[in-house]
Amino acid sequence: MIISSKGRYALRVMLELAQYGGDGAYIRLGDIAQRQGISRKYLESIMTALAKAGLVESALGKAGGYRLVRPAEDYPIGEILQAAEGELMPVSCLAMDGKPCDRSGSCITLPFWRGLEEHINAYVNSYTDPTTAKELGLTLINKGCDVIGAAAGGSGVGTAQAAAENNCYYVAWDCYYPEVFTGEQLQLGSALSYFENMTIAWVNDAVSGNFRGGERTEYSVDSGACKFDIPDDSPLTEEMRAELADIQASINSGDITIENKMLHK
């Protein structure tokens, strides 16, 4: 099974609506096409499929366009891909509109293909799954973790709920969860990424003739691409804050180097 450009673009469009339409505003089709580098005509077919599946709604007029119909974190990726691609079947015989293959009764490979289909659907639908994320967070807490965190997109709220309900400290990623931590402040801080700084660096390299395509470029704390943000009401003490500031300064100066290696294979 290969996800076509229609499925890939559908994911990008939904992320675009989540990013620019967070206040419920309609995003114009032309703006989406321009930012995403997708032809308007092709984009129209994608939006039609998403609207037909009830994932987006449209409005006409000067202020019209498209917007999400529910919070971004409530969209499983599998639902978006299925709206754009149809059923996510690894083999065609599983997508025969309920009509069994002539060999289904004797096909010894059929259980394998059905199992693969289940794993595919489970994976794509788990990417935005706060319930499972909360269970994983609770597992860490039950093992004795005093601090948990997650870089898990829309699933991250689940780990935040696990921390809030069990008086466990929490490290967020590119966000905060004030709606979850309504009592004692347990959020130590958040790891923030500044993609705009990386984009500006790419543009500057291109303008100066130093841009090298096909090569890997690393951006870190020292280049302003990320930092650990500490809110004013964080439970971190002044001594801890000062120590973190010293560590960041040491990274910027090169006294501390961050080893870059794959953590998971």
Image: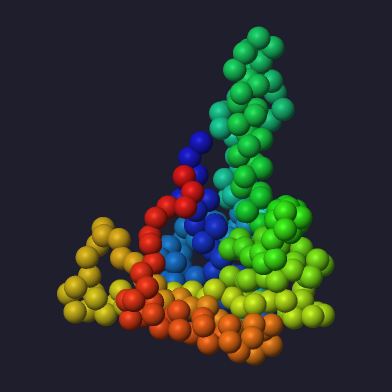
Front one among 185 and 178 = 185
Q: Is residue 55 visible?
A: no
Q: Estimate the x, y position of residue 8 in percent, counting from the top left.
A: 50, 53
Q: Quadrant of residue 66?
A: bottom right
111 above or below 80?
A: above
**Residue at coordinates 56% horizontally, 65% vertically from top-left?**
15
| Residue 57 drawn at (x, y percent) | 68, 67
Q: Position of residue 24 (x, y in %)?
A: 68, 78
- Residue farthest to the left, as pictured: 209
Residue at figure coordinates x 65%, y 77% from the top left: 188
Q: Is residue 264 above or below residue 57?
A: above
Numbered disc total: 0
Q: Foreground residue, 39 or 187?
A: 187
Residue positioned most to the front:
239
Is 2 situated above or below 259? above
Q: Residue at x 64, y 82 (%)?
A: 236
Query: Coloured how?
Result: rainbow
x and y percent of residue 124 in the render? 61, 47
Locate residue 252 relative to residue 32 in the image: left or right.
left
Q: Quadrant of residue 25?
A: bottom right
What residue do we see at 34% from left, 76% from top?
Answer: 255
Please indicate whether residue 135 sits to the left or right of residue 50 in the image: right
1 over 149 or under it: above or below: above
Q: Is residue 125 visible?
A: yes
Q: Residue furthest top?
A: 106
Nearest the viewer among 91 and 146 is 146
